[in-house]
Image (tube, rainbow, N blue to C red):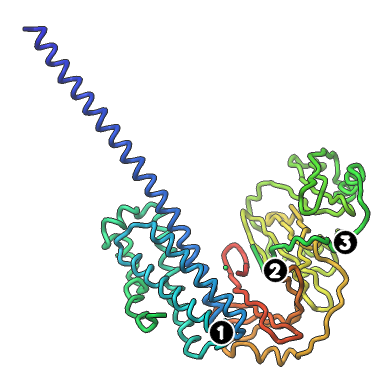
Amino acid sequence: MVDKRRWLIGCIALLIILTFVTGYYAFKLREEYNNLNENNYTEAFSNLVNYVNNVENYLAKAMISRSPEHAAETLTQIWRDSNLGMVYLSRIFSENEGLSQTAKFLNQVSDYSYSLSRKNINGEGLSEDDFKNLQTLYKYSVDLETTLNQLSEEIYSGEISWEDLNLNSKSKFAQSVDSVSVFSNIDDNLNDYEGLIYDGAYSDHINKKEKLGLTGETITEEEAKMKVQEFFGEDFEKIETNSFLENADIPSYDFSVKLKNKTEKYSIMISKKGGHVVESNLDREVESEKISQEEANEIGKDYLASKGFEGMKETYFIKQGNVVTINYAFEDNEIIVYPDLIKVRIALDNGEVLGIETSGYLNSHTKREYVEPKISIEEAREKLNPELEILSENMAIIPTEWKTEINCYEFKGKVEEKEFLVYINVETGKEEDILVILDTPGGTLTV
């Protein structure tokens, strides 16, 4: 009888243990599933925010463009990014009213931008009503981006989860955005339209087959070491060879360099042809910011002049970790030559130059024969959107995707506190490009 009781107690205990283990295992599976879903939702949402940001910037360009060719290209980009935004939105299975209204907004922007691009392609041109509609869409896109960014902050901070959004459309988020009316008003205000872009201007270097700035004869590794020693001067102490980068855009010798009174090592690349410095870099902790942007601009300019790069003008910059990277373009007779670009990294604690990157300059720099403008700057100004308030104007050379260059008038202006750069061809009067200037906490960028 005792044995039977013990057996029964053992079975009950085993059953309890099995129940506990099974329950715990099911709990862990559910937890892993929920974490996976959260990660997938967050990734999709991050991509959605990026594409909404792109739509806003391209709408800004479209509402001031007066060139049918450029407008068609910009509107096509809006159509593309709106659709990509909807793809990522579809991966967020939320019943939240705000997200469903976002889907409708993106769908209407996509349809409308596509219809306008077809008008431009067919040579019809856009009417004043079309431009007014684009302006209205732009305003809503700004509101939408603000709201999505706020939601993003709440998700990443843990104030709200995707489970909250999916299960309760009256969630903390919905309650916290009463001041932003875009979610509640987009549907009503867009009924009239039914059926209806670091790091600085031209900073993506064009890798040309013929390296115009790569002058001089082929050098050996030992000759490249001499170039390194010349570059660092009296501070030089020791050099180590890392490799030869044969398949790089500019074939180069790669070295590590120890300087006097420094624990960190510089990396530096010297081109095989001509012995030019392609890139130099020092990574160190920069814990404070004592140097102003204006001081950093002058430090970079003086540094470039000391290395033989005369006539460089600062254009755009970005700050990261108390280090500023400044783009300098070659300036010749007050013409800004954007293809001839050099980047300089400066520590903001003491103004030390941490790095230089010259590939844009080495690809493009040459003595140019500047074209004689066939239209005056006054005539070019007349081709601008009349709502653009001009802040500055000058001449510039910009690169094209076909690896050529265009002489333009560069107009910096603003519409409703949004700043733009507009480029008008000095020979044809064609609107070649429009860039949106973004003043961010980390620097001044363009898209």
SS for dot 3: loop
Look at the image and tell me in which quarter the C terminus lies. bottom right
**Which numbered dot is residue 244?**
none
443 up-or-down from 19: above or below: below
Position of residue 165 measured from the top left corner of the image (x, y, whole percent) = 31, 57
Q: Mark 2 or mark 1: which comes first in sequence?
A: 1
Disc number lying in front (2 or 1): 1
* Gap between marks 2 and 1 measured at Cα: 24 Å
Position of residue 295 measured from the top left corner of the image (x, y, whole percent) = 73, 65
Left or right: 420, with 403 as reference point: left
Label 3: which residue? 308
Give the residue displayed 54% in from the left and 71% down from the top. 77
Badge 1 crowding class, 10 Å Cα cut-off, few under 14, some 14 to 19, many 20 or more, is few
Check disc 2 and give the amino acid type. Glu
Look at the image and tell me in which quarter the N terminus lies. top left
Q: Mark 2 or mark 3: which comes first in sequence?
A: 3
Label 1: which residue? 122
Left or right: 170, with 445 as reference point: left
